[in-house]
Image (cartoon, rainbow, N blue to C red):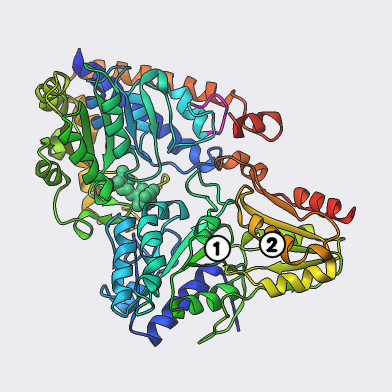
Amino acid sequence: MAKINIVQAINQALREEMERDADVIVLGEDVGKDGGVFRVTEGLLEKFGPARVIDTPLAELGIAGAAIGMAAYGLKPVVEMQFMAFSYEAIEQIFSHAARLRNRSRGRYNCPIVVRMPYGVGIKGPELHMDSSEALFCHMPGIKVVVPSTPYNAKGLLTSAIRDPDPVVFLEPARLYRAIKTEVPQGEFTLALGKADVFQEGRDITAISWGAMLHRVIDASEGFDCEIIDLKTLKPFDEETILNSVKKTGRVVIVHEATKYCGLGAEVAAFLAQEAIMHLKGPVARVAAPEAVVPMALLEDYYMPSKERIRRAFEEAMKY
Amino acid sequence: MKAQELYRMVSLIRRVELKIVEVYPGDVMQCPVHLSIGQEAIAAAVCRFLGKNDPSIGTHRSHALYLAKGGSPVGLFAELLGRINGCSGGYGGSMHLVDLENGLMGTTSIVGGALPISVGMAMGTMRPRIACVIFGDGACDEGAFYESLSFASLKKLPLLFVCENNRYSVYTHTDQRRCSRPLRIAEACSVRTLHAPIDAANDAVTLYGLIEGEMGRLRSGGGPLFIECDTVRALDHNGIRDDIAHGWRPAAEAELVKRYDPLILTGRHIDRETREKIDGEIRDIVESAYASALKSEPLNAGETADKALFP
Ligand SMILES: Cc1ncc(C[n+]2csc(CCOP(=O)(O)OP(=O)(O)O)c2C)c(N)n1
Ligand SMILES: [Mg+2]
């Protein structure tokens, strides 16, 4: 198996799925000739031509809507938003239509679109280029939300997302794009949506994270007997894996780069309060970003949950 | 006199941008930059018609607008350097400039995001003030473009739309994105339009003369005005590379850059001696502004950081 990075893994997933299934279409701003802002779609136009790799106008709402219309006619569009915050332009189509078509048509048709977008802090971007608004999409019924943490996950999860019959928001941790390489199987390979990974087993603390924060958690866990869970699918999240772990450890630290208020950590904590209260030894802790707009580069490290902040949360948890 | 002032502004914008190009490789500015080189004349000419009390709003590529509106080079440099003396406290960076003293209400990295807001500004501001929004051809692809034109026209607002049409959104040419020129949409909305071809738009003095009459009508309550300026981006979409040399845009673009250099075109209206004198003064201003920006405190962790996060 070859070692590749996340950009290459996603490119591979797109390429292979497009080869297998003529209904898979890629569209977005600069995705064709230019290969996308992060070069994720590089080479696809040359291989599949302009009918299947579509350079669009600079118009996110129109792009998302067009994808929905294509999906209604049996195509499987994969949309790229250049950065997560630009998807806010498209929220009307995603929330008001993509998310609801299955329900609205009483199950007579569905909406198999994937909306890919880079997200998260750590790329020295300014505000609106490093948002982590995953909870927004998790909140809307009818949408699945997926976040890979490694090239291996990226390929397997994206392939599944493309095949999924419903809308999937596929969040790509921009910080990780070229930062890590792992072995990724060539050829067809899927990872089930809705399943978390136990990245590392442990007895004292259940540490739950996803995307780029998984790697921070791994770094911070040295010296703690941590069970590290990589959520991978944020909506619907894998209740069983979380529950099994918490029953064992009784201590929970959730780490995400989004802000805390109504972040996904709140939902996980509420789930545990309901389903695992008798197993918890102490409060469920959340390490998150401060309640502020993402700052410029110099403050980036201060803004992001740091190794130190995560370790402090582990220490606190161990007091119980 | 007017020609001198216009040349001075074009020269200032150029010099500031070139200073950024000079220091950028040293990674002192950890902030993406969208430079205005090649497009300086538009903001320079348009802003001559705007006072400090005329609210304006711009895009990701707004260094020219910021300076032409009267913003200090120190405030811009400090912003890019992430210093507290930056015009946005070093927090927002190149794409999020705010300079209320000079009526720059903000710039935004969301393409098209400024357009609807400018409509509200025009509603909120009192005659004889006017509001101004500057945006690229890419912004005209967004639905908000039409919504804003239609609303502004309906209410006969004192709003100046300035489209800097460099034909590119990143590396994607307008012909791959649009079926017609932006000003056709403005016409369809019954907004008065002016078209400045590149030889006019890249020459601040010519552009000034071209729009003067219509600017007067706008100021005296004639309803919104749409000016489409054909222009050319000299460097990469983002950063300081020469993207044309790298093959990202066709070589013909380099021809335009050379032929329609705003500094040269605007400079033709004044004598060489004056030009050199102005350039010399500007060089000193920019050098000392950069030095002064470097002295400002960086936004580091700790108390400064907390203050920065929660203003
Ligand atoms: C809503 C939104 N979509 C996409 C982007 C990414 N983006 C930033 S600048 C740009 C091109 C804008 O082109 P144009 O408006 O013509 O301005 P120019 O860069 O040519 O000055 C794009 C696609 C963005 N910032 N915001
Ligand atoms: Mg443009």
Query: Would you say residue B260 is visible in this rendering?
Result: no
Looking at the image, which residue sits at the far top? B1
Estimate the spatial distance between the alpha carbons at disc 2 and disc 1, rounded to whole Å: 13 Å
Q: Percent from the top left, x then y, of residue A40?
A: 45, 67
Q: Splitting the image into 4 quarters, where does residue B166 fall? A: top left
Q: Is residue A200 above or below residue B75?
A: below
Q: Main secondary structure of the magenta part?
A: loop
Q: Regarding mark 1 in the picture, which secondary structure is present there?
A: loop
Left or right of residue A289, residue B201 in this image: left
For this rendering, which residue is in front, B311 or B44?
A: B311
Q: Which residue is mark 1?
A: A177
For the point 35% across and 64% down, the residue is A97
Q: Which residue is mark 2?
A: A215
Q: Are marks 2 and 1 in contact (CB under 8 Å)?
A: no
The count of marks equals 2
Chain containing mark 1:
A
Residue B84 is inside the magenta segment:
yes
The magenta segment = B81-86
Query: Would you say residue A258 is visible in this rendering?
Result: yes
Q: Is residue B6 above or below residue B62?
A: above
Amino acid type at circle 2 is His
Amino acid type at circle 1 is Tyr
